[in-house]
Image (cartoon, grey):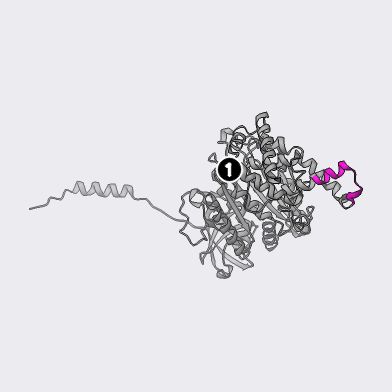
Amino acid sequence: MTTHIRPEEISAILRKQLADFEKRVEVYEVGTVLSVGDGVARVHGLADVMLGELVIFASGVMGMALSLEEDNVGAVVFGDAAQIKEGDEVRRTNRVASVPVGDRLVGRIVDALGVAIDDLALVETHEFRPVEVKAPGVVDRKNVHEPLQTGIKVIDALTPIGRGQRELIIGDRKTGKTTLATDTIINQRGQEVYCFYVAIGQKRSTVAQLYETLKRHGAMEYTTIIAATASDPAPMQFLAPYAATAMAEYYRDSGRHALIVYDDLTKQAQAYRQLSLLLRRPPGREAYPGDIFYLHSRLLERAAKMSDKKGAGSLTALPIIETQAGDISAYIPTNVISITDGQIFLETDLFNAGQRPAINPGLSVSRVGGDAQIKAMKQTAGSLRLDLAQYRELEAFAQFASDLDQVTRRQLERGQRLMEIIKQDAGVPLPVAYQVAIIYAGVNGFLDSIPRARVREFEQRLFEDLESRYGGFVRLLNKEKELNNEAKESLDKILNEVKERFLA
């Protein structure tokens, strides 16, 4: 059998193949390492590099351009600087620092670049976001009006947090700052709030412990941990909060709710100070660079409650700042206080006196206030702050109790019981109905006849009865969200019955 080759067919095939052929020329801008040391490389030859752009060194280590000078570029190194030597080739990537975002990050522990460090599979996501973006404008925002329940009585009653708020947690080391943040994350179970915990400059054992706590309470189902630990380079500690915020913004911009905890921004400021001094930037107060305020303001301004037009999503931020000897007037604390919508102040003396959480109600404030509370809590907690303030004033005279008049003695005794009811164990966040019930009992004198030492026992009995006997009241309060006449009568009756059984 003879095969006939038709020349026109061959030429048609060739023409088609030539038409589909594209010339591809890859052009890279290449520079040279002039010097390297302390996690910073000086690079010559990258004339068009952008601020914040990723660069890649010959050894495969990544870096980021952080200082653009006339004759060289200062690049911070995201890895082992020992692998980089003078004369090495450096290549531009033409993309600013970005991290993977999306639902695949939920339940994972990642580093500041979004790389998994939890020995599980790689994070497979096709969506990336730049770590630094402009904060939403005024028009795109809405005032904070939805409560974000922490489950902690003293916070939800006195310094409430709303979705889209920035509430600072401030205090000395070992006063329970991380515990507050952890309990808030645990309390978001079933609330459709995605949580992000950023560990900056912490020990790896501390991060592992936190992971186990969240996992035990089922909170890792909706939480991502971003870890830049004490052994990680300073650039990673500097970048981690921005990277985590980019991951959280994915949920805010898709009409969902997210909560981010920065633990803590003091260490990020110290890491940035280190980088700035190595990049030869002029030091200012406490050796921090001049743009240290901008470092935190551009980060915290990204927390917002979005307008309905933008999907009504929210990003709530809980930055943590560590103070030295309770000094809230230091440079970094005052900077962050001025950017945030209030602060929760933890006091060492209260902590040592056995008050847990050790929150000072006098120095703690929420600038959103009652807007972030349900009506029932607003009605109940109205007089709590005043009662506590009066008690703290009179406390100094408590040792002269025998010489005090009846009214003052009653105030002191009431105040002591109120201090007992705002105590709370770690890892046990409370539903808002339970909080309303016990605070109502305290401010309305139901606890006055109960010995101070037994107030916590009474509280426990009340919560057990609310769960087993009085579920109707809890459902009513959750539905109405206010203490109307029916709810008040019901609560008065419940408290009297529980008290009678307790004292019997």
Q: Depth check: 96 or 432 in front? A: 432
Q: Quadrant of residue 290?
A: bottom right
Confirm whether the magenta stretch covers residue 406. yes
Judge whether residue 160 can be spotted in this image: no
Using the rendered view, name the quadrant where residue 479 is placed. top right
In the rendered image, the residue lying farthest to the top is: 485
In this view, 420 is above or below 376: below
Q: Residue furthest right?
A: 403
Point 70% across, 36% down: residue: 378
Residue for badge 1: 468
Is residue 256 found left or right of 276 in the rendered image? left
Residue placed most toward the observer, 491 or 24: 491
Horizontal side of residue 24 vs 178, given as left or right: left
* Placement of the C terminus among the 4 image quadrants: top right
Residue at 83 percent across and 43 percent down: it is 411
Question: What are the residue bounds of the magenta stretch?
Answer: 400-413
- The answer to whether any part of residue 285 appears in the image is yes
Percent position of residue 122, x then y? 46, 58
Left/right placement of residue 182 relative to residue 103 reads: right
Expressed as whole percent of the image width and height from the top left, the position of residue 213 reads: 58, 57
The location of residue 8, given as percent across then percent down, is 20, 46
**Number of residue marks:** 1
Type of secondary structure dominating the magenta stretch = helix
Is 144 situated above or below 266? above
Which residue type carries mark 1? Ser
Instruction: Tell me, yes or no, whether the highlighted magenta stretch contains residue 261.
Output: no
